Image (cartoon, grey):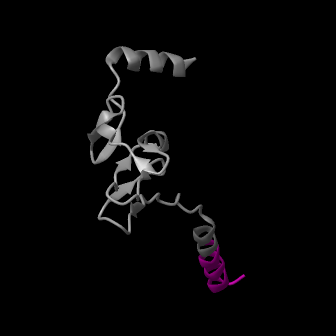
Amino acid sequence: MTAQESAQDTNAASLVSADVQPASEPQRRTQTATCSGCDARWTGSSRAHCTAPNCHRTFATAGLFDRHRRGFACIDPTGIDGMELRDGLWRSPEMTEEQRAAAAERWSK
């Protein structure tokens, strides 16, 4: 094998090894959802937005959304078991330190 052939083999080997290296993990992109009937925007797959006329509220979970609907009517979330608007979402009341500790204990079992 000549020096030139040897150099070509080396270059080919580097190209192959560069092509075979594992690709980096794909980056996760946060998708923003919007409502066509209002200017609301939110992220997160667990969110629920009410598109009923004169409502257009966004809830942190589908369960909270369900609690605000009675048949075909919307119930004002301020009157539902302490539901509150935080960070642009209607949410359940924040947990107390005791509730957090109890939940952490349940999850660790």
Q: Position of residue 87 (x, y in %)?
A: 27, 45
* Total marks placed: 0
Q: What's the residue at 57%, 69% (across, down)?
A: 18
* Camera-side residue of 66 and 104: 66
For residue 35, above or below residue 81: below
Rendered image quadrant of residue 109: top right
Q: Is residue 4 left or right of residue 35?
A: right
The span shown in magenta is 1-13
For residue 30, above or below residue 66: below
Q: What's the residue at 49%, 16% (across, down)?
A: 105
Q: Is residue 48 left or right of residue 109?
A: left
Dominant secondary structure of the residues highlighted in magenta in the image: helix
Q: Position of residue 67 (x, y in %)?
A: 45, 39
Identify the residue at the far right of this view: 1
Q: What's the residue at 61%, 80% (across, down)?
A: 7
Image quarter (top left, top right, bottom left or bottom right) of the N terminus: bottom right
Q: Position of residue 13 (x, y in %)?
A: 64, 72
Rendered image quadrant of residue 38: bottom left
For residue 42, above or below residue 78: below
* Camera-side residue of 16 and 38: 38
* Camera-side residue of 58 and 29: 58
Residue 90 belongs to magenta span = no
Q: Position of residue 45 (x, y in %)?
A: 48, 51
Q: What's the residue at 39%, 18% (across, down)?
A: 99
